[in-house]
Image (spheres, rainbow, N blue to C red):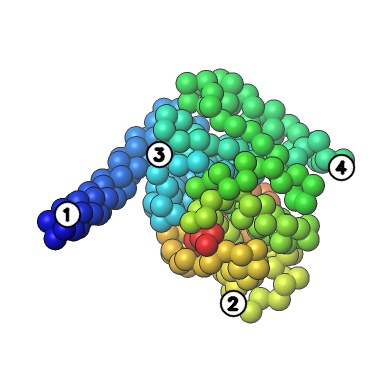
Amino acid sequence: MKKSLFRALTAASTALSLVAAAAPALAADAGAQLDQILAGSHRDAKNAARDPYRHPKETLEFFGIQPDMTVVEIWPSAGWWTEVLAPLLKDEGKYYAAWFATERPGTPDMLKEREKGFDAMLAAKPDLYGKVIKTRLFAPDYVDIAPKGSADMVLTFRNVHNWAKAGNADAMFKAFYDALKPGGVLGVKEHRAAPGTPFQQQIDSGYMTEAYVIETAEKAGFRFAGSSEANANPKDTKDYEAGVWTLPPVLRLGEKDRARYVAIGESDRMTLKFVKP
């Protein structure tokens, strides 16, 4: 009886050691693959030029991405992150591109044209993008971004201000929660306002407070799991005539003080990680 117990404990200890040893190896594998993807010739040169401001590898490693995960990207727009995520996930994982619900009445023509460009990008490189699964999202009417409880990770980049303005942020975060497995991760990157910024000023400027994002996520049932300063930009004064869109890549003021805004770079951004219990 004692020998049987000893064998069982030994086997369990060995299994745990193997799991512990495998974790760094998996992380290293993801990092190596990201290095190759980010250096790949498939990327648009204008997109690659934004890497020093968007820190894709550091951001994805902080969220804990692995090549065998099921990942949902929210509103991929022109496909900046698609160029990184789809190649990483195409062999062992699954990538859902939860696009705008452009069939909604009143959808701007600009979004419809951008979707055509996104579709053309996917079609042009089927070896990289042929397995991308496109879904629709605009809560509360379009929320089937992936089968419920199927995703390991949901990622959203610089979108929360849009939902706050539309008044549907709570419904959007609920859609993320529903798509994730227990233990699944929600990764949020967003323009960061100073603590205590009035809500209407957040809406007008495009900069949201960390407190607002955390509160909205926790209201949906998420647990806050930490933050990273990978996307911080101390040069960003956040007091511009045209809000966050004054800065690159939009540069809404055109040539007015352009050199100043280019020197600042892209916005100061929060990088927050949440977990579905």
68 relative position to 139: left or right: left
Q: Is residue 164 left or right of residue 108?
A: left
**Residue under pointer 1:** 4
Q: How many marks?
A: 4
Q: Is residue 269 visible?
A: no
Q: Disc 3 versus disc 1: distance between alpha carbons?
A: 38 Å
**Frontmost residue, 8 versus 272:** 8
The residue depicted at 87 percent of the width and 40 percent of the height is 105
Q: CA distance from mark 2 to mark 4?
A: 34 Å
Q: Nearer the viewer, mark 3 or mark 1?
A: 1
Q: Secondary structure at mark 2?
A: loop
Q: Residue at x 69, y 64 (%)?
A: 205
Q: Amino acid at mark 4?
A: Gly
Q: CA distance from mark 1 to mark 2?
A: 59 Å
Label 1 secondary element: helix
**Quick one: SS at disc 4?**
loop
Q: Which residue is mark 2?
A: 195
Tell me the amino acid under the disc marked 3: Pro
Question: Which residue does the numbered mark 3 point to in the structure image?
Answer: 67
Residue that label 4 marks = 106
Q: CA distance from mark 3 to mark 2?
A: 36 Å
Which of 255 and 223 lies nearest the eye of the viewer? 223
Amino acid type of the residue tagged 1 in the rendering:
Ser
